[in-house]
Each structure stands twice: as structure tokens, then as C-alpha cells.
Amino acid sequence: MPPRVPVRTSVRTAPGGGTVTAQAEPSDRRGTEGGVLNVFSHGILLIWGLMVTLPLLWAVMSAFKTDKEIFTSPWALPKALHVDAWGRAWSEAHMSQYFLNSLVVVAGSLAGTMLLGSMAAYVLARFDFPGNRFVYFLFVGGMSFPIILALVPLFFVMKNMQLLNTYHGLILVYIAYSLPFTVFFLTGFFRTLPTSVAEAALIDGASHTRTFFQVMLPMAKPGLISVGIFNFLGQWNQYLLPAVLNIGDENKKLLPQGLVALAASQRYKGDWSGLFAGLVMAMLPVLAAYIVFQRQVQAGLTAGALK
Amino acid sequence: MQHGKYRFIAGFLLIPLAVYGVFVISPFVQAIYYSFTNWSGLSSKFEVTGLRNYRRLWNDELFWKALGHNLLLLVLLPLVTLGLGLFFASMLNVGGRRRRNAPVAGVRGSSVYKIVYFFPQVLSIAIVALLFKFAYNPNSGALNSFLDAVGLPWRPEWLGDPDLALWCVMAVMVWSNVGFYVVLFSAGMSAIPKDFYEAALLDGASRFQTFFRITLPLLWDTVQTGWVYMGIMALDGFAVVQIMMDGPGPDYSTELLTYYLYTKAFNDGQAGYATALGVALLIVTLLFAGVVMKLGRRERLEF
């Protein structure tokens, strides 16, 4: 149903703002309406802003308190900055180890995802061959399937291939489950790039492979950054896959997984401040990176949902 | 030249397809096969039992309970999350005091709101679920001590109360996803030409009319995509239930299909039955996506 909007094409804003006089009459009434709405908007927006930030602030405050303070005055500022909980979480509770493990796995899986994803997407976007559509839909179809269904057989596939509880196994699985979105997004992106530059390179005698790496990949940089951010956050924050496929050594856990284990053990010990320190420790680097690169992160995460 | 082209195509597709085939496609196909067997998952021996798992499913009260919870989430979660997302996004983009040279304007500080609302989206679901596990703690958690501080006598058990637990799970999922939709819809709204609003306001349209007659129809594609995303999330919910609830909740009040599947496969040694649950989940997912696409189909508006 087309919107029945009375669009008057005759009245348009001239570059110099020429509609000011035309607007003068109705805007008097609307001005006050706008004022009331403005206060109302700010109020509502502020409330949601508090609902988002207060739980996070509460966790940060608790990480600097003593266990007793956490129980007796949960919303008060810490009386003194106790940082000993941070040391306990960092070394005794293996948070440093979990950070390192996550870095190793995500470095491998992100590089692999970007390489394999862009290779497949480029071929699917730019070359006509029998089965092209089929392969494309095979990849893209993976986006709507519940991962947990595949997880039961996957566990045994990994076990039989001796990949269970190994980093290279996890890296391969992360790559495989990141491919559907990566291929979907990059295929669309490669299609929007002009063909002439690649053709010129081929005529000049560059091979297809060389054209891809030296001409097309640099041209696709904005798309690669978007999907790279998307994959980085998805893989860094991944919980389900390691929770099932990386269940061997305590010291080999990844960050989100290790955090849940830490919560279980510190709770048992009653070390609440250590627990909050661990939580905040995992939270702050991601939030800080997000604040620095917020424009790119927002664009990267919403890229797939915008046409 | 042709020869070189096909070799190149094969060379570039081989490894991605192999990785994808081994770790994604083959487990999915196997899962469907195992759903017709009595495989325990512990030994390599099993028999094909036909539809027995599905008959058992049909008579399994816990399956229906879990499915009911998932369906409740499937209806409410997109409604609440997308509703709030649209509401906040339109306030941020057109809710502000009108300035001289612009027909519509966002409220002041809208970019700061957008940054803050997006916070939960960049955090791992493990962090979010743990945070709320402590916040909901009836004795020392943030929520009850907040109620205490403002002088309210209400002290719910939150996650311990069978009538409240599922709502607590839902609240966490809303909390962590609203920001994504605010940013998504804001991007969509900023692409709508300002002339449309200007013309409508000149004709005396109210803000509600401009929202329902201009913003929403022109944003419809994005809303529909968001609806499918959020629905798929409502059918998951595994991490929140596993981490925050430590299980299916009091009286199975937060049992979800994904968590039930997980316990059947990895705790109870009933992998065959678990995959049947997974197939049921897959069918619900595909039905849902089909319905949204069908119901939501409208003439596409170009602008």
C-alpha cells in the first residue's frame, strides 16, 4: 500500500532556506507542541539511557568494593578503591590466560574468515559458472538454521577428527559458521564494484588470482572493514560453540566461557568482588574499543540488515 | 583463457566449500538423519527407529511447555524490542524541537544516546547474562537494593519465582537488543528525504500521522528484516537460560527448546531424541520466517 502522503512537490526547501515564510503560519501552533514533546522525549530517552548504564556502573562500582560493602550498600560508592580483587581475578582466576586464549583463536579465525569468505564471495559475485546460484544459496541458507541443531553431530565430527578441545579445531568451526553472513555480505559488495579496473588488470596480463589480491581486495576495503568488525565481535563474544566444543582443560577456556566458569567458582568461594572484577575486566576493553570506533562498529553490525 | 577461469573458480571455492561442508552442512544433514534413530551419542551403535522420536515428542509435556515459552517469546520479543526501537529512533531523529532551517530535527545529544543505547550490543551474551544473574539476586542484587533505596516494600524473588522468571529472561533479551534496532532504524530514517516531512507538516499533519504515514511505510523493509532477526533470537535464548538461570528455572518455568535439546544431548545421552527436538525447532524457525515474509510483503517504495 503506497502511503497517502500529500507531498507537495511545489514547495521545497531552496538551497538558501527559502521556505521560512511559507512555514511561519502553521509553525506557531506546532512550536508549542514541539516544546512539550521535546521535554517528554528527553525524559523517556534519559530513562532508557539510565536503564542501560546503571547495571554496568553497578558492576564497575562493585568491582572496587569489599565483599562486605557489596552486600551491605550495593548502590553506594566504594569507600576506598580496592584493587586487590582485580589481581585475584587476573592471575588466580586465570583471566589473563582466557584473554590470551581468546586472542589466539579469534586472530586465527578472523583472518581465515576474511580470506576464505572474500575468495568465495568474489567468485560467486563475478563469475558465471554452472552451479553458481546453488553454491550461493548453500552458503546463505546457513544464516537461518539454528546452530544448536548441528551442534550434536558436530561434536562427534570434531571428536572423530581429533579436533575437539583444540584451538585449530575451534578456529575452523568459527570460520565455517561465519561464512554464511560473510559470503552473503561480500557477494553483494563485490557486485557493486566497477568491473573496468579488474578488466584492465587482466588485459595487462595479471592472473585472476593476482587481480583479486592486488586490485579487487583493496577496492573492497570498506566492505571488508564492516564485515570484519561484525565477525570480530561475533567471534570474540561467541559463547555457544566453545561451551560445547572446548570442554577439556580448564586453562584452555576462552574468555566468555572462562568468565562463566569463574562465576561458578568464585560464587562457591564467596569471592564476590573478584567475580565483579573479572566481569568488568572482560567488559571494559570491548566497550572502550567500541567508544573509539563507534561509527564503524555501528555501521558494521547493522550492515547486513540495511539494504 | 576459459580453462584458466574454471581452474581459478575451483581453486577459490574449494577450501571455503570444504570447511563449510564438513563443519556446517554435514552436521545439519546428519542431525536430520539421527532424529530417526535411537542414538545415545555415547556409543557408535544405534538403530533406525523411524518416527519413534517424533511420536515421543508429541507426548512429551516438557517439549510442549518449552515450545510454549519459545512461542510466547516469539510473539512478544520482536513486538516489544522493535516497538521500543522505533519509538526511540523516531524521537532521536524527528522528536526534537524544530529548528529554523529544518522541518524535523532530532533531540539534542541524539548521538550520545545512540552510543549509549548500543553498549549491550557489543558485550558477549555471557557477560550480559552474568551481570543480570547478580542484578536479580534477591538479597544483594542491584534490583532489590534499588527497590529498597526508593522505599518500595516489594521484594520479588525474580529468577526464583516461577511466575516471574520467564519475564526476567525476556527483559534481559529486550535490554540487550533495543540499542541495535535504535541504530538500525535511525540509519533508515536519516535516509528518508526531509522534504517529505516538510510537506506533511505544511499540510498540518501531526507527528503521529507523519510517523504512521511517512516514516513507518518507508522503513518497512528494515522493520521486516529486524522482525526476522529478533524472531530467530527469540527461538534461541540458550545462553541466557543456561548462564543466568543455571538450568530450566523453578518448575521448568524458563525451559526453552534450545536448552532442552542441550540437556538431552549432552547430559542425558539421548542424542537421537535431541536432534528430533532440533528438527522441530528448525521447522518452527522456517515457518516463522515464511509467515513474516508473507504477511509483511508490501509494494516496495522507492525514494
Image (cartoon, coloured by chain):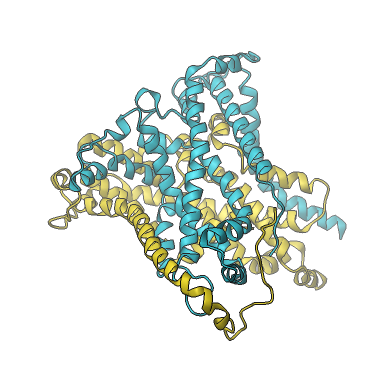
Which quadrant of the figure has residue B282?
Answer: top right
Give how far across and how far down residue B57 sits, in percent. 56, 18
The spot of residue B156 in percent (x, y) is 26, 35
Q: Residue at x 70, y 42 (%)?
A: A138
> Where is the C terminus of chain B found, in terms of image quarters?
bottom right
Residue lying furthest right in this view? B2
Where is residue A119 shown, x and y percent of the image? Answer: 68, 56
Q: Colour in which chain A is shown?
A: yellow
| Mark count | 0
In-image side of A211 versus B62 (left or right): right
Residue shown at 40%/24% (left/top)?
B252
The answer to whether any part of residue A14 appears in the image is yes
Q: Nearer the viewer, residue A21 or A196?
A: A21
User: In the visual, does B124 lie left or right of A64?
Assistant: right
Residue B7 % position (x, y)? 79, 53
Chain painted cyan: B
Q: Is residue B98 visible?
A: no
Q: Report the residue at 44% width, 23% height from top.
A: B267
Quadrant in which the N terminus of chain B appears: bottom right
Residue for point 66% across, 38% down? B290
Extreme-bottom residue of the structure:
A16
Q: Nearer the viewer, residue B192 or A5?
A: A5
Q: Nearer the viewer, residue A295 or A198?
A: A295
